[in-house]
Amino acid sequence: MGKEILEGCKVLLHTCGAVQPEEKVLVITDETSKEIGEAMYACASEYTDATLICTKDRTTHGEAPTACVAAAMAAADVIFSATTFSLYNTDARIEACKNGARYINMADYSLEMLKQGCLFTDWDQIRKVVDETAEKIVGKELRITTPAGTDFWTSIEGRHADVGYGTSIHKGEASSPPDAECAVGPADDTAKGILVIDGSIPLPGLGIIKEPIRLQVEKGYITKIEGGKEADILREALAAFNDPRVYLAAEVGFGLNPAASLSGRMLEDEGVYGTMHIGIGNNLAYGGSCNTPIHIDLIMKQPTCIVDDHYVYKDGELV
């Protein structure tokens, strides 16, 4: 393992995971992400008694792991999930954290992410910013506009703020470094307006968006997808799930990591400071009841966001 890769794994192990020598550490990986998983396992094994599980690739973000993997997650103190697609929005992850496990999501990592700056940031300061921002996004209604044409409104009444610190240092915490964010779920059937996606969409064939995609939202669901070739790819990808719940506006997220930049990879892109994202599909983590196995983030640049009568973001800067 190269020295630079080792340093990134150490940040995940000690800073993001706060792993102690006596803890049971589980590393989950799959065939596509095996090199990342093995690097994380090698690092963890030098410090504690770690277990590595390699499973078959899931087909999309939010798809449930096998029963064997879920059982191993339930028995672990700390879980590093170095898989191609994220297990964050799965019952297995949610139940493991309810049981006290700390979860670090490493979905769709590249070796470059272990070497470069997005992990090497001031995580203590980020935790403070996430908490401060989370207080601002609790309210009755939320509106987003962007220079690209987004004009989106939703009720958030009764919804809680979900925080992603990028670190999991307390029992039950789940994080997705280098992603640092806070998020809130739209109230049922209330989201409406236009979303123009000009940042990235972490799906095969998409990544960083070259031609903005225009989405119409009515009564909480995407009803129309317009644009060029990338819009066609998104339309076909969502239709292939054959599940109307994948069109649900499930999450409104705020990227808060100043060391992250758009790369086409989900965990870095959704955490980029100055961006916001709309998550679609599963909304269990955000106070909803939609249990579709799919959750996909759609990232927008330079947002202005108002909650009730105060700004959260203005032209991509926190207020």
Image (spheres, rainbow, N blue to C red):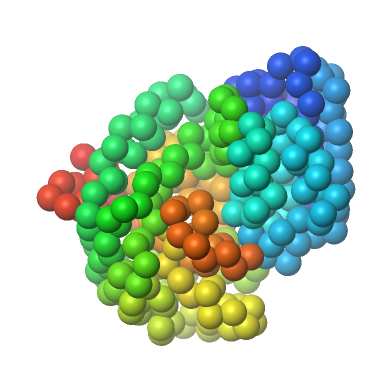
Q: Is residue 16 left or right of residue 161?
A: right
Relative to 59, residue 307 above or below = above
Identify the residue at image location x=39%, y=56%: 185
Depth check, front residue: 125 or 286? 286
Q: Is residue 273 left or right of residue 290?
A: left
Depth check, front residue: 304 or 50? 50
Specify whether residue 8 is in view: no
In the rendered image, residue 68, in percent from the top left (x then y), is placed at 85, 50
Specify whether residue 96 is in view: yes
The image quadrant where one finds the C terminus is top left
In the rendered image, residue 11, in percent from the top left (x then y), is placed at 64, 25
In the rendered image, residue 165, in percent from the top left (x then y), is placed at 48, 34
Relative to 98, residue 275 above or below = below
Relative to 170, residue 205 above or below = below
Q: Residue furthest left?
A: 309
Q: Is residue 229 left or right of residue 154?
A: right
Identify the residue at image location x=62%, y=71%: 205
Identify the residue at image location x=59%, y=27%: 171
